[in-house]
Amino acid sequence: MATLPLAQSPEAGVCCSPLTREPMSIADAERLAGILKAVADPARLRLLSIIASHDGGEACVCDLTEPLDLSQPTVSHHLKVLVEAGLVTREKRGRWAYYAVVPAALDALGGVLTTRHANAGDCC
Amino acid sequence: MATLPLAQSPEAGVCCSPLTREPMSIADAERLAGILKAVADPARLRLLSIIASHDGGEACVCDLTEPLDLSQPTVSHHLKVLVEAGLVTREKRGRWAYYAVVPAALDALGGVLTTRHANAGDCC
């Protein structure tokens, strides 16, 4: 799973904004670009939003094909990209696979781009 | 200039998270994907971070070629993509062009991805 170039996770209550704090290293920029590429696609953004707004933040793959009007293999490909980026988890239960967003991963991604991290007490 | 699919700007003190709040429309997803594609590139991420961490959050194009080890036309192309996405402004002063990040645009982009928008009072 790809990891974000955060020195400290926002889960730890620490705000960090590598993008605007200091010049980003090549390695960090390549890692972050990889994760951003996973979300920089209309079908994957719609998948994320459909999964996240589903009951319990989880959706069966059987409920994801119709709203996107894409073939099942295409939807599966997009879901695989999101899983590999660490933005979505996949769990097989019975006949179907269930997908859930990883809020901490989205928050970390959003946090890297956001400039407003004045201090750890009043942000995020 | 591209605009983010935010019903209300975070500048207005309103938090919104279209990505996880409700299924995203095709038009919003295409708009957001376009802006994310602008940042989903290692060279452009490094450019953003170099400009943002420069004195006054602004950098001369003459200071941007060497740290990236890319040709001047390549750097200019990347800067044009960032300007067209509304993430960076360009101002010609004398011989050189000066680039500055647009914090509100980065904050809006980060805010769209972030899930933690419990209410307007304690977020962002």
Image: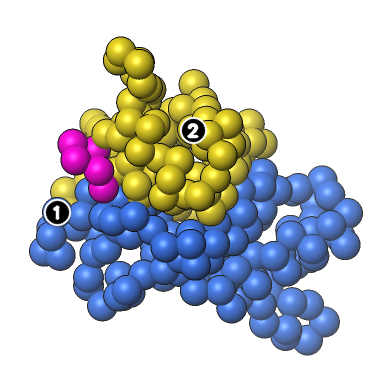
Chain colours: A yellow, B blue
The magenta stretch spans which residues? A53-57
Q: Does the magenta stretch include residue A55?
A: yes
Horizontal side of B10 relative to A121 (left or right) equals right
Residue B21, by quadrant, is: bottom left
| Percent x, y of residue B16 | 27, 63
- The residue that mark 1 highlights is B118
Same subunit, labels 2 and 1: the answer reads no
Residue in the picture at 61% in, 48% down: B40
Q: Chain letter for mark 1, please.
A: B
Q: Chain letter for mark 2, please.
A: A
Disc sitting over residue A79 in the figure: 2
Q: Nearer the viewer, residue A122 or B29?
A: B29
| Percent x, y of residue B112 | 37, 57
Q: Is the magenta stretch mostly helix, strand or loop?
A: helix
Q: In which quarter of the image is the C terminus of chain B?
A: bottom left
Q: Does the magenta stretch include residue A51?
A: no
Q: Can residue A117 be seen in this view?
A: no
Q: Nearer the viewer, residue B52 or B106?
A: B106
| Percent x, y of residue B70 | 84, 49
Q: Examine the rendered structure and indicate whether residue B106 appears above or below residue A75.
A: below
| Disc 2 to disc 1: CB gap under 8 Å | no
